[in-house]
Image: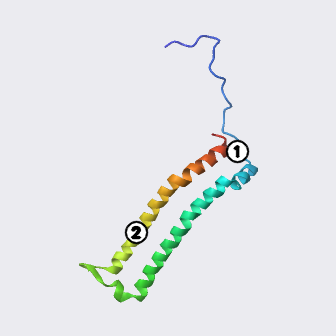
């Protein structure tokens, strides 16, 4: 390997150390920006309906288990009754909502939040 000629140097080194912390005013400006408001709206537009749907499904299961014993004990396949199948469906519903949220976040939330963070930290 050859060394660079003496007297020549590469680009001047930049400042060493972490970037300055954003100020409270910058955080407030970001919080009031249309982009951040849209980000919150997108999150809430997904999270609130999914939370309500899951809670309604769970409450329906609990109420059916408590007050509709005959309905829940209907045999479906072998020793599996409707109550067991609906109980296991709670797990399926949890995984489904998680998958839907990950898909929503990757597509709609993460790109916007990354852009806001990069602008706030000055790394864009």
Out of 46 and 3, give the one closest to the viewer: 46
Above/below status of 73 relative to 123: below
Task: Residue 53 in the image: state x and y as whole percent.
Answer: 49, 72
Quarter of the image where one finds residue 7: top right
State the image quarter where residue 18 is shown. top right
Q: Gap between marks 2 and 1, in whole Å?
A: 42 Å
Q: Is label 1 in a helix, a strand or a loop? A: loop
Residue 50 drawn at (x, y percent)? 51, 68
Element type where label 2 sits in the image: helix
**Furthest-left residue in this view:** 78
Give the left or right position of residue 35, taking residue 110 as reference: right
Residue 2 position in % (x across, y down):
51, 12
Judging by the rendered image, the residue that carries numbered circle 2 is 91
Per the image, the residue denoted by label 1 is 21
What x and y, as percent, mark residue 16? Answer: 66, 32
Give the image quarter of residue 60. bottom left
């Amino acid at each position: 390997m050859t060394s660079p000629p003496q007297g020549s140097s590469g680009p001047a080194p930049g400042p060493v150390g972490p970037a300055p912390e954003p100020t409270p005013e910058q955080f407030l400006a970001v919080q009031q920006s249309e982009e951040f408001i849209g980000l919150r709206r997108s999150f809430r537009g997904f999270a609130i309906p999914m939370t309500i749907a899951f809670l309604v499904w769970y409450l329906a299961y609990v109420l059916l288990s408590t007050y509709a014993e005959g309905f829940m004990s209907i045999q479906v396949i072998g020793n599996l009754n409707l109550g067991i199948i609906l109980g296991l469906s709670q797990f399926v519903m949890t995984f489904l909502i998680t998958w839907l949220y990950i898909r929503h976040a990757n597509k709609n939330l993460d790109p916007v939040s990354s852009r806001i963070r990069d602008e706030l930290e000055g790394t864009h």
